Image: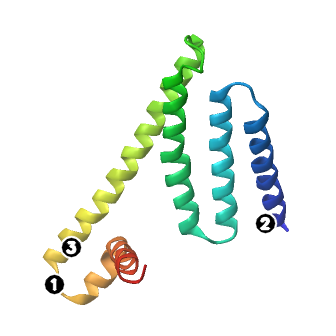
Amino acid sequence: MYLSLLFYFIASIAVGSAIFVVLNRNAIYSAVSLVLCFFALAVLYLLLEAYFLAVLEIFIYAGAIMVLFLFAIMLLNLGREEALPRFMQLQRSLSLMLVLIFFFGIFLILFACAVCFFVNTLYKDKYTLKYSCKVMVIISQLSISILNYY
């Protein structure tokens, strides 16, 4: 029940933002609503349990393609030249928060790998290797499956 309601809510966001892309006169607002549409599609992929497609949707479309679109918009000077100061303050604080969250995640991954390496060098038996570093095992299994089968 809840998944169907969530599906209809996210699908309406995707359709609404797609319509907003086509009907909006400002190119920058259209590009931002296209990013919203890409994220809504990624959530729909998550609801379909296609996790890899959801990650690819975010990385490839919402990341790389939108950078190209925004670069072309800025190159053609289709946006406004001046921004409102309060939005600049909000943008700075939001970007600082996102950068801190990103580097905290990187730190957690590196810390888990360092602990795994330390435990493996301290204890050489397979029991410790199997249960101490699940992160490294998952990453290695994913890389083997991608490089061998796909």
Instruction: Label 2: state its secondary structure.
Output: helix
CB contact under 8 Å: marks 2 and 1 = no
Q: Looking at the rendering, which quadrant does residue 22 occupy?
A: top right
Q: Quadrant of the C terminus?
A: bottom left
Q: Looking at the rendering, which quadrant does residue 51 occupy?
A: bottom right
| Residue that carries the numbered disc 3 in the rendered image | 119
- Give the distance between the C-alpha atoms of the residues marked 3 and 1, in whole angstroms: 8 Å
Which amino acid type is marked by label 1? Lys
Left or right, residue 25 beside residue 137? right
- Give the distance between the C-alpha atoms of the residues marked 2 and 3, in whole angstroms: 41 Å
Give the residue at x 60% y 15%: 80
| Residue that carries the numbered disc 2 in the rendered image | 3
Left or right, residue 140 beside residue 92? left
Of labels 3 and 1, earlier in sequence is: 3
Give the residue at x 38% y 47%: 104
On screen, 44 above or below 70? Answer: below
Where in the figure is residue 102, as x and y percent of width and height?
Answer: 41, 45
Where in the figure is residue 70, as x and y percent of width and height?
Answer: 53, 33
- Give the distance between the C-alpha atoms of the residues marked 2 and 1, in whole angstroms: 46 Å
| Residue that carries the numbered disc 1 in the rendered image | 124
